[in-house]
Image (cartoon, helix red, strand yellow):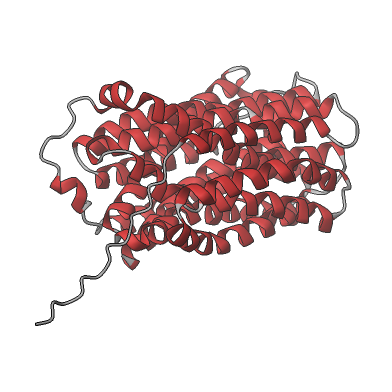
Amino acid sequence: MSRLAAASLVGTAIEFYDFFVYGTAAALVLGPLFFPTFSPVAGTLAAFATFGVGFVARPLGSVVFGHLGDRRGRRPVMVISLLLTGASTVAVGCVPSYGTLGVAAPVLLLVLRFLQGLGLGGEWGGAVLLTAEHAPAGRRALWSCFPQVGPAVGFVLANGVMLALSAALTDAEFAQWGWRVPFWAAGVLALAGLWLRSSLTESPRFLEIDDHARVPLVEVVRHHGRLVLLTAGALAAGYAVFYAVTTWSLAYATERLGVSRTVMLTCVMAAVLVKGALTPVMALLGDRYGRRPMCLAGCAACALWMLPMVALLATGEPLLMFLGILGALLAFVTMFAVIAAYLPELYEARVRCTGAAVGYNLGGVVGGALTPIVATALAEHGGRVPWGVGAYLTGVALLSLGCFALLPETRPVPVPAVEPATG
């Protein structure tokens, strides 16, 4: 389990590094480079729109790779998805700007972002299921949380590289070539991830299945359609909160408040590090008290914290901004630490890779794709404190709270020990 958890964590870290480095670049530099004819706000919105394309592609990736995972096994999904995401990320770093290619530059950016999302849509299902289906029932949330730690590691890696380059280079150097370096580094990381995953064994639960679904998506829609919609709605809050604080807040603080890139990246990275460290703790609580109670508590905390969070962000004071972001991410991790165990347990094994991944990635479209765009537009038309952004995030959290309330508990019930017979 330790080797499997490590390989899953490293793999998801690499793939989410690829995904997050784009989000950071979109917030900081892609607007002027690829949409120079737009106003600064419109350029940021356009860059966030290309960011959102990755989320739109993720459900399609979960269908394609989910079919492979349910028909051929979880392990091939982990290898192919990593290759696709890594190659498309390196290619983003090679795309010339609008000044060189004209309109072809943002079009290429869109295509490559779509391929990134396609690969990531398959990655989560493969990595999480391989770990969850190997794990003992009483510690499934704990072992399954390690792929969920991967996004935190990937985010810190992506933003750490951006932070180092931002501090070492002038603004002109960063805009000219510095922002491309993290994308090129993705190639080396992908090769390392493939080496780690080459020795993994297939899920024992998959090998036990005698009757594989012929077309998993059709079976999921026919028999689990309501469950997919509920899980998508339930996860929307987590995505909305995470990408509000890790993507939108970067653009808001640097463009509207005049906070330096270095300060803002440091605040966000520090909060994400704390979130990553607490993920196993929250997962242990999920094994002890159940998946659904943790998700309900996390959603309620998100709903209560969003207005204070935007007020703290609007101060422009690094410590207060950090506290606002940290509170949001603690609420987020309360529910998302157990999701990797919860979602697979909701679906039968023969369609689990498709069902769990489609629900998870549809939640990303509802919560992750729209949030940076909506939040940027709301903040632009508000005052110094973007109350509209807080109200929007609160509304998404309440929607997710209602969806979680309609989902069942899945935590395995411990079997009591049988007392030996006495004679």
x and y percent of residue 396 in the render? 64, 32
How many numbered dots are placed on residues in this image? Answer: 0
Residue 194 in sight from this viewpoint = yes
Query: Is residue 358 or residue 256 the one in the foreground?
Result: 358
Furthest residue in direction bottom, as rendered? 423
Query: Is residue 24 or residue 181 the one in the foreground?
Result: 24
x and y percent of residue 193 in the render? 38, 54
Query: Is residue 58 or residue 348 the one in the foreground?
Result: 348
- Residue at 53 percent across and 60 percent down: it is 282
Looking at the figure, which quarter contains the N terminus? Answer: bottom left
Image side of residue 180 versus residue 57, left or right: right
Image side of residue 221 versus residue 378, left or right: left
Furthest residue in direction front, as rendered? 423
- Residue at 62 percent across and 60 percent down: it is 273
Image side of residue 146 versus residue 178, left or right: left
x and y percent of residue 99 in the render? 68, 24
Image side of residue 322 versus residue 179, left or right: right
- Residue at 37 percent across and 24 percent down: it is 225
Residue 34 in sight from this viewpoint = no
| In the depicted structure, whether residue 384 falls above or below residue 264 | above
- Residue at 53 percent across and 47 percent down: it is 295
Looking at the figure, which quarter contains the C terminus? Answer: bottom left
x and y percent of residue 288 in the render? 45, 62
